[in-house]
Amino acid sequence: MSKRMTGLLIALFLLVLCTRLYIAYSIPGFSSSESYFNLRQIESIKETGNPIFEDDLSFSGRTFVFSPVFHYFIALFALFLPTILAAKLITNIFAAALVFFIYLIAKKITNNCFVSFFTAFLAGFVPVFFADTVTELSPISVVIPLMFLLIYALMNVQEKKWLYCYLVLLILLTFTHPIILLFVLGLFIYLALILIEHLRQKREELEIALFSIFFVLWGHFIFYKKLLVFHGPSVIWQNIPVEILNNYFSQTHIIAAIYNIGIVPFVFGLYIIYLFSFKKKKRSIYLIIAFAASAGLLLWLMLIQLNTGLIILGIALVILFSQWLDQFITSVKQSKVSNFIYLFLALLFVVVLIFSVYPSITMAKHNLGAVSSEEMQAFEWIRDNTPEDSVIIATPEEGNFITAISKRKNVIDTDFLLQSDAKQRFNDVKRIYSAYLEIEVTGLMKKYDADFIYFSDNAKDLFETQELHYIEQCFEKVYDNQVQIYKKTGCASRIIE
């Protein structure tokens, strides 16, 4: 790589990083429930050296099974910086570093520096990845860039240095996040495509692919054996109640998915998939198609979080776009309109600004309001004005805020693993928000030893109710500022089984 191109890539990285940090530090905290679960784990490691596996607050007492590698990594930097400052800085540095890895992959595919740089720019502003990682504390910010570096290492596995890099990354990602299972599925599909297209199978590539598949599956079986025994096949859906799962996926249709990915990579990426599925053959393109197909398949089967699947699909389509752009430039240069090549590229750049960069920034800013300042004040009020052993009724999304900010017990949150009564709890919480009879609600409150109801706009939307219909003698409104908090008072009740 020339010094000029290295300088341009560093400038692009700094542009993406500065844009991210400007948005990230415009709010004091984070914008998602999962972020506060991760923040709580990092703070626990920082204070005690250990994550929280046995938690007295979540579900009013439960066991967690998760990999703490990401949390230890962030906690290392939190030893020298405030936790939130360190978390935002490190995760956004890794997310912005994606531009380097996409440049390398595109350069491997096209051998065109300009095309690779343009592709890297586009990768820096994939709307769903940009918006979902700027103001959220999630392993995805680190894992996604490393997974695409893993793909590049696989493309160069015949070189010893990249083989070692591949093995290190494979081991690290296997014990960091289950998203590596998508990589394994992609390898399956890639080997199948090579076989179907009658391409010569490279021995070293086949060996490393088979090793990767067996190692990742073995590693996950060992690490998550407890979950497999407890849940059986339903562990694939993380024991999420069906109503939540269906509601989650029904909120996004094809137009929204295209907007999240970006119309340019979506259209031209799909064109390249069609072209190399029926008319052309290229090993490196099949590798990227395989990972796009694995993400699409898991989304179709609802086996992956919606935005995570769209992130991987979107970045894979961005890489495939580089093949289209390389072919487009070559065709124009050989045509009678070759003098207009720079005009065409300028128009394409404007389209990218409109349909990728602008949506990225707009969606990220929209996420800033996912948790309003009034809601944060309500969580802090609970922390400062309720007994330490209080149990708070809230929606699953708000459960982690209750434990992380309010330091109080919740009845339900978004981690349903190892919870045999997850569906019953969700239905009971739903009944608390939508019931008309006080005696039913007070019975359910007693069942979970709950003291307070947190009534927010999120609860109104999720349970389709604008008010609590039973607030008369048994409940007292103790807080009212966009969010209402109700306290259960002394009142005859019966337990609802």
Image (cartoon, rainbow, N blue to C red):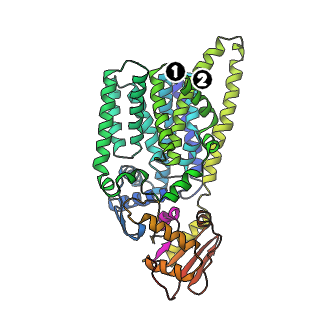
At label 2, which amino acid type do we have? Leu
Query: Vertical placement of 412 versus 477: above or below?
Result: above
Instruction: Say which residue label 1 marks.
Output: 110
Residue range highlighted in magenta? 390-406
At label 1, which amino acid type do we have? Thr
Instruction: Say which residue label 2 marks.
Output: 325
Query: Vertical placement of 246 versus 114: above or below?
Result: below
Which residue is located at x 27 percent, y 48 percent? Answer: 222
* Circle 1 residues within 10 Å: few <14, some 14–19, many ≥20: some
Q: Where residue 418 sits in the image (x, y, percent)?
A: 36, 61
Magenta span includes 150: no
Q: Are marks 2 and 1 in contact (CB under 8 Å)?
A: yes
Per the rendering, the mark at residue 92 is none
Q: Where residue 193 sits in the image (x, y, percent)?
A: 43, 26
Which residue is located at x 57 percent, y 71 percent? Answer: 378
Q: Secondary structure at mark 2?
A: helix
Which residue is located at x 38 percent, y 28 percent? Answer: 191
> Which quadrant of the structure image shows residue 446?
bottom left
Q: Where residue 388 sits in the image (x, y, percent)?
A: 43, 77
Nearer-the-camera pick, 120 or 439: 439
Work out whether mark 2 precedes mark 1 in sequence or the reverse, and give the earlier one: 1
